[in-house]
């Protein structure tokens, strides 16, 4: 593994990653892992590097600043005992026990029960209303009416169609075919050019045209 | 002051692109003055040496701009 060199890491970050952000730091870790010597990124925003020998380096100055122009690359090994080294820092001591007497005593007067009772009273006979609505829905959803109508219409239609089909099957169109063949000479006799003269239209009718009138000015 | 560059053993390696296709590259370790090691992976194209020289010059400039 390539030994860790803080100056080389800083020069690399400054040279190839001009935009200072945690995302760019992760990109550098992915693209050039040799500079990080097997270390892992961690911290509240992921701006710190922990090496396999447990050394920790802070790589971004003012990493939580929303203004990216205020951030800059750095490779600084913080000294021991700084609380901001921890991902989840503890509160500074000394700690004071919680005084149980400061907790508010629950009120013996019920608060929510009258509110719920009043709301239920405004609903009135809601159960009866829902029951009637449910009965209407159940009655409307019964298939009895549809079954009755089906038997009275579709079932009868089946018998009617069947009898008509039987009549058609029993019919013999022979006499109709013979009669149609006998009409052919009559049709042929009337075939030919139309030679009748068209009727005369008569003399043209004279329609008098009225003289135009001048408008009267008052 | 011009910092001398000392190169280590250049190795041929393969990186993988997003599709998993192997891409040949050169792994170049080097020192710039007393700083390093730097390690750059450069795509093994015909002008990889030119790209290496460009990166080394940029790193050298960054090193000289850092506060001492």
Image (spheres, coloured by chain):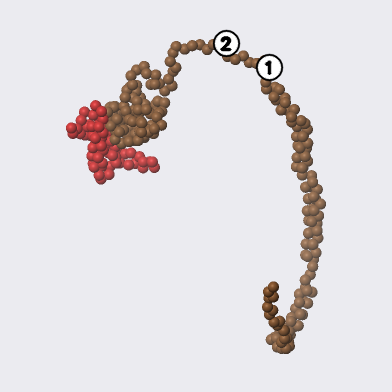
Q: Nearer the viewer, residue A169 or A56?
A: A56
Q: Any mark on residue A101, and which?
A: 2
Report which quarter residue A116 is drawn in: top right
Residue found at x 68% / y 19%? A110
Residue found at x 40% / y 25%? A43
Q: Position of residue A128 (x, y in %)?
A: 78, 33
Q: Say what secondary structure mark 2 lies in.
A: helix
Q: Nearer the viewer, residue A111 or A210?
A: A210
Residue found at x 77% / y 39%? A136
Q: Position of residue A205 (x, y in %)?
A: 73, 86
| Residue A201 visible, this angle | no
Q: Chain of mark 1?
A: A
Q: Position of residue B66 (x, y in %)?
A: 26, 30
Residue found at x 31% / y 36%? A16
The Cα–Cα distance between marks 2 and 1, rounded to whole angstroms, is 20 Å
Relative placement, left or right, of A66 versus B61 is right
Q: Chain of mark 2?
A: A
Q: Give the chain ID for the brown colour.
A: A
User: Which image quarter is the C terminus of chain A in?
Assistant: bottom right
Q: Nearer the viewer, residue A2 or A209?
A: A209
Q: Colour of chain B?
A: red
Residue under label 1, please give it.
A109
């Amino acid at each position: 593994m390539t030994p860790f060199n803080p100056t080389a890491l800083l020069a690399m970050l400054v040279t190839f990653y001009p935009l200072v952000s945690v995302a760019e730091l992760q990109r550098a870790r992915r693209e050039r892992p040799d500079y990080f010597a097997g270390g892992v990124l961690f911290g509240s925003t992921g701006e710190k590097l922990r090496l396999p020998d447990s050394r920790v380096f802070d790589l971004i100055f003012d990493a939580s600043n929303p203004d990216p122009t205020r951030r800059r690359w750095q490779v600084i090994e913080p000294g021991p005992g700084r609380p901001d080294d921890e991902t989840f820092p503890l509160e500074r001591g000394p700690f004071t026990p919680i005084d149980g007497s400061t907790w508010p005593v629950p009120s013996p007067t019920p608060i929510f029960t009258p509110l719920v009772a009043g709301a239920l009273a405004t609903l009135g006979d809601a159960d009866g209303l829902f029951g009637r609505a449910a009965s209407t829905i159940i009655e409307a959803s019964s298939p009895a009416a549809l079954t009755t109508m089906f038997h009275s219409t579709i079932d009868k239609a089946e018998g009617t169609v069947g009898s008509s089909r039987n009549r058609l099957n029993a019919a013999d169109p022979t006499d109709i075919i013979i009669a149609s063949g006998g009409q052919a000479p009559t049709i042929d006799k009337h075939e030919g050019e139309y030679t009748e003269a068209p009727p005369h239209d008569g003399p043209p009718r004279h329609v008098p045209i009225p003289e135009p009138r001048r408008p009267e000015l008052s | 002051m011009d910092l001398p560059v000392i190169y280590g053993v250049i190795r041929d390696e393969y990186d993988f692109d997003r599709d998993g296709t192997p891409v040949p590259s050169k792994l170049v370790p080097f020192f710039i003055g007393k700083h390093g090691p730097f390690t750059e992976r450069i795509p093994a194209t015909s002008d990889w040496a030119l790209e290496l020289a460009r990166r080394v010059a940029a790193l050298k400039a960054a090193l000289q701009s850092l506060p001492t």
